[in-house]
Image (tube, rainbow, N blue to C red):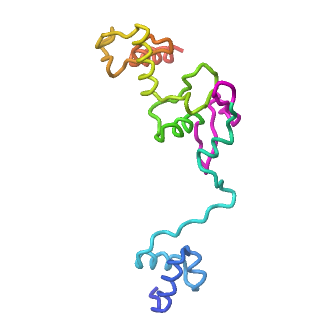
């Protein structure tokens, strides 16, 4: 369907004001497919969708803050929802589920975590940003602790030949282990069960 120049100009004005294809079509008495074709011809991108009335105006960090409670020692306790299959602390923000510790890590570091995020303090269930760490951070800090207490090892590979530079991890007590061997043992246990 070819539109008159005046209609095309009116359509361009509506698109410039942020009208959707449906709203522009309704205003000018044309079908929305024609409005969509002219939107593309005129070089307008998709119309910005209005924020739903029930959508939170809080940022991700602000929403996270509504579910935590400060406790002694600078720790934080989660008061929000937990998944029924394992107790993982989660909340929903703008229709997406987030892990409480993942968001705490992002608040502290400004980046997405690598691997699992766990609390490195001794308080069960702590979600304080200063207490959580991702896999590389945990390996680094536990490795430093192992060196301080004399558990660091000069070995370059584990007994099964895995390079320690890539697979060495540390328990909370500073004792080293091979992540590849640990994963293989877990797989064997699960297969046997």
The x, y position of residue 117, in whole percent, is: 52, 30
| Along the line of sight, the residue nearer the viewer: 4 or 59 | 59
Left or right: 185 in relation to 83: left
Residue 117 in view? yes
Q: x%, y% of residue 167?
A: 36, 20
Q: Is residue 95 magenta?
A: yes
Q: Nearer the viewer, residue 48 or 62?
A: 62
Please give left or right for residue 21 compared with residue 151 in the image.
right
Quadrant, the C terminus? top right
Tell me which corner region of the image, top left, top right, bottom left or bottom right, holds residue 71: top right
132, above or below 150, in the image: below
Query: Which quadrant of the figure has residue 156?
Result: top left
- Taking the image as shown, residue 56 lies to the left or right of residue 144, namely right
Magenta region includes residue 40: no
Tell me which residue sits at (65%, 33%) in the image.
83
- Image coordinates of residue 114 in percent, x first then y, are 44, 33
What range is drawn magenta here? 71-99
Q: Is residue 80 above or below residue 122?
A: below
Residue 145's spot in the image, x, y percent?
Answer: 44, 15
Q: Is residue 121 above or below residue 147?
A: below
Residue located 40% across and 78% down the image: 41
For the point 54% across and 29% down, which residue is it?
A: 132
| Residue at the extreme front of the image, as rendered | 73
At x 47%, y 88%, the residue is 3
Judge left or right: residue 179 versus residue 74: left
Q: Is residue 86 visible?
A: no
């Amino acid at each position: 369907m070819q539109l008159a120049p005046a209609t095309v100009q009116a359509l361009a004005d509506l698109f410039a004001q942020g009208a959707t294809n449906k709203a522009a079509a309704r205003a000018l008495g044309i079908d929305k497919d024609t409005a969509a074709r002219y939107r593309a011809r005129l070089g307008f991108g998709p119309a910005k969708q209005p924020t739903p009335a029930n959508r939170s105006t809080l940022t991700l960090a602000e929403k996270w803050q509504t579910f935590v409670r400060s406790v002694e020692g600078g720790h934080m306790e989660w008061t929000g929802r937990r998944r029924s299959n394992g107790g993982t602390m989660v909340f929903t923000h703008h229709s997406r589920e987030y892990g409480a510790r993942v968001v705490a890590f992002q608040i502290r570091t400004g980046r997405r975590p690598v691997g699992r995020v766990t609390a490195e303090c001794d308080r069960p269930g702590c979600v304080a940003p200063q207490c959580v760490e991702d896999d590389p951070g945990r390996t680094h800090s536990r490795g430093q602790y192992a060196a301080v207490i004399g558990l660091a090892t000069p070995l370059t590979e584990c007994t099964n030949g895995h390079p320690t530079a890539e697979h060495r991890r540390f328990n909370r007590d500073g004792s080293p282990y091979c992540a590849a061997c640990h994963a293989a043992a877990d797989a064997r246990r699960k297969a046997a069960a």
